[in-house]
Amino acid sequence: MQLAEPVVSSPGGEVNLEERRRVEVLQCLESAGIRSVAELSDMSDADRCKWLFWNLHENLDAMRQMEPALQARINSMQYSVMDEMLLADQSALNKRLDLSCRWTMELSFPGYPEEVTYPIGDGWINLVIANEAPAYLHVAAGQKAYLDADHTTYPNQIYLEGWISDLLWQDIRTHLANPNPSCRTDVVLLDSTLFPVRGDFDFVAGPPGAIGVTNVEFRAFSHPTERRMVRRSEPRRPR
């Protein structure tokens, strides 16, 4: 049976196109989203991604109980700088950081001592490096990024579009460019920073069906052997 086209009206009676597009996107995700948590292990990466997006929009209170966290393991990076003219007598540098990554989802369950991790596919993190969000980036005031997916095969690849300050970039750049293959950097998004882009959350923005992100956390990890060598070089503490 073909679903009727959703029509959502604003208090003034006009059709809210943004909300209608959001509902249309969520209808495409519903078949995976309504499946139980117990089925996550048997689902494909793409279906787990659909499950996450749908439940964050339609089942947010229950999702908060599981404290969802998204972790992006960085595979490679590309840093680019472009000199662009803003006005006739001014110029500015457009700095961008593009990260190829592997996304995983962590959920907490009662009775389990640790989070359960599920892969949800490959993707990208595209970040503008600036002191404030550029005007062309679709984020609200104070918002850092939004999570979206490749809508041509929704969702095939999950990606994060947003911005970070130049100060943060200076702190993380040496970790991202570390030549040691045993060192890695992850981007972690916690449940307290994820909010569905919809009418009742006006502090996040993004494409229909997206997830707003209010904080971007980088975690750098070193090889255990490297950490042991650092400890051995430190003076012994008196007992």
Image (cartoon, helix red, strand yellow):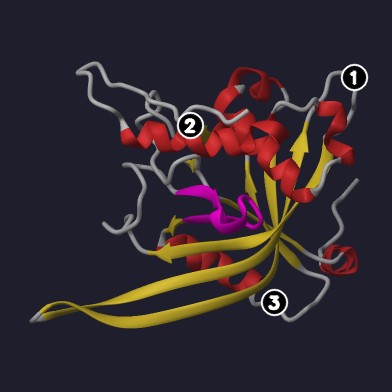
Secondary structure state at the residue bearing disc 2:
helix
Please, what is the three-letter code of the amino acid marked with disc 3? Asn
Q: Which mark is first along the chain, 2 or 1?
A: 2
Instruction: Write the residue at 60% across / 63% down.
Output: 124
Q: Quadrant of residue 165?
A: bottom left
Residue behind mark 3: 178
Disc ID at residue 39: none
Q: Comparing marks 3 and 1, which lies closer to the viewer?
A: 1
Q: Which mark is first along the chain, 1 or 3?
A: 1
Number of callouts: 3
Instruction: Write the residue at 87% across / 27% down.
Output: 38
The correct choice, above or below, for 88 with respect to 97 in the image is below
Residue 159 location (% of width, % of height): 58, 56
Determine contact: label 1, label 2, CB under 8 Å: no
Which contiguous range is marked in magenta?
Answer: 145-161
Q: CA distance from mark 2 to mark 3?
A: 43 Å
Residue 183 location (% of width, % of height): 78, 69
Q: Quadrant of residue 206?
A: top left
On-image quarter of the C terminus:
top right
Please, what is the three-letter code of the amino acid marked with disc 2? Val
Determine contact: label 3, label 1, CB under 8 Å: no
Residue behind mark 1: 111
Residue 103 location (% of width, % of height): 71, 53
The correct choice, above or below, for 234 with respect to 181 in the image is above
Disc ID at residue 23: 2
Residue in the foreground of this view, choosing between 168 and 54 = 54
Instruction: Write the residue at 64% across / 61% down.
Output: 123
Q: Which mark is first along the chain, 3 or 2?
A: 2
